[in-house]
Image: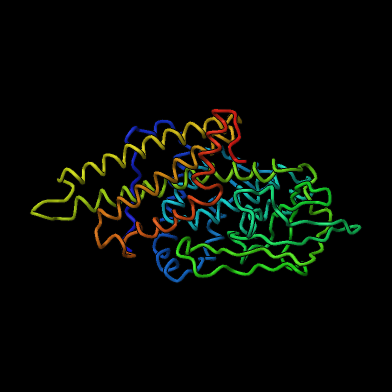
Amino acid sequence: MEKDVYQHPDYYLMDELLTDEQKLIRDTVRAFVKKEISPIIEDYAQRAAFPKHLIKGLGEVGCFGPFIPTKYGGAGLDYISYGIMMQELERCDSGIRSTASVQGSLVMFPIYKYASEEQKMKWLPRLATGELMGCFGLTEPDHGSNPAGMTTNFKDAGDHVILNGAKMWISNAPFADIAVVWAKNEAGEIQGLVVERGMEGFTTPETHGKWSLRASATGELVFDNVKVPKENIFPHIKGLKGPLSCLSSARFGIAWGALGVAMDCYDTALRYSKQRIQFGKPIAGFQLTQKKLAEMITEITKSQLLNWRVGVLRNEDRATPAQISMAKRNSCDIALKVSREARQMLGGMGITGEFSIMRHMMNMESVVTYEGTHDIHLLITGMDVTGINAFS
């Protein structure tokens, strides 16, 4: 892969909307990415391996739950800062961003929101540094877009519960130390609980043969009569609100991250088009190339403005799940279209590991699916504007 010379596009001078602290955070994460991740990511993706040695560095630059208060080991940053960090990570690779956003939004977020003080102090500080890594168990083999239909369950057994069931398509599962799992109690109510590696009957088989997110570790969570202490159950939440609030947090990060993919592909295509000579001049001088680049930067700019605005609303605790849903769907859609167009602009070179575009294309096929598919997010917006539920 060629040297990482990425420069983020900023057609509408969006940097003027960022604070000095937010720009410093972006520069810090970008420098880490360029030094530590860009030189190795293609090799790991080709080998379908996760670069576990990066975990310590990701913790040191604050990419794990940066919005968590300092009392619990987080950086106490605002949500735009979090979005910027995810954008910088996914600009390099979606799998690396997935690892960070699962840790922050799907593991640390629910512990911070719904756990007891003792549970928070037990897990959050070590999750923030990467000493502990976590995963999130909601999706099941037969229940993806309909999480309410989950069959994973637990039954009371005195000072502990007995957990049975399985979760699928779980990022970080193969190496996670803890899993935030959502399951039904005997009354059929959904509750969250923390399952720790080493508990008898708890296994995490790895998923192989992926053509997407190849530098991310994916697996299953299998629970065979697992004894989970009752002190591992979240005391402050019951029902779908718990896992869905986690998904909103994760979708917010994905909205920023997926846009990073579009920005990287555009930056690569723009630079290549100025260097690639055909018919006696750079292909950037041809009308069709300029049309493609103009459409790319237009959609990127619109998405930057949308993400910034939902970030402001989230900082003010006013962003609705539906607004976050729209941002996630939009960014994924733009990233898919821009990456495919950029791939064509690079011709044969676009499929090689010398450039990031083909890897981005494959990764986005997963990102557009998880945390709510494109169609599910359309229905969320549709229900929000009409007031009519079209899911059933």
Residue closest to the eye, 242 or 33: 242
Residue drawn at the location 52% of the way across and 34% of the way down: 311
Q: Position of residue 228 (x, y in %)?
A: 80, 60
Quarter of the image where the C terminus is located:
top right
Q: Position of residue 359 (x, y in %)?
A: 39, 60
Quarter of the image where the N terminus is located:
bottom left
Q: Is residue 114 left or right of residue 348?
A: right
Q: Is residue 135 left or right of residue 301?
A: right
Residue drawn at the location 54% of the way across and 65% of the way down: 52
As drawn, the residue found furthest toward the front would be 392
* On screen, residue 129 above or below 44: above
In which image quadrant can residue 23 be found? top left
Residue closest to the eye, 330 or 380: 380
Residue closest to the eye, 185 or 30: 185
Q: Is residue 299 left or right of residue 49?
A: left
Q: Is residue 8 visible?
A: yes
Q: Position of residue 362 (x, y in %)?
A: 42, 58
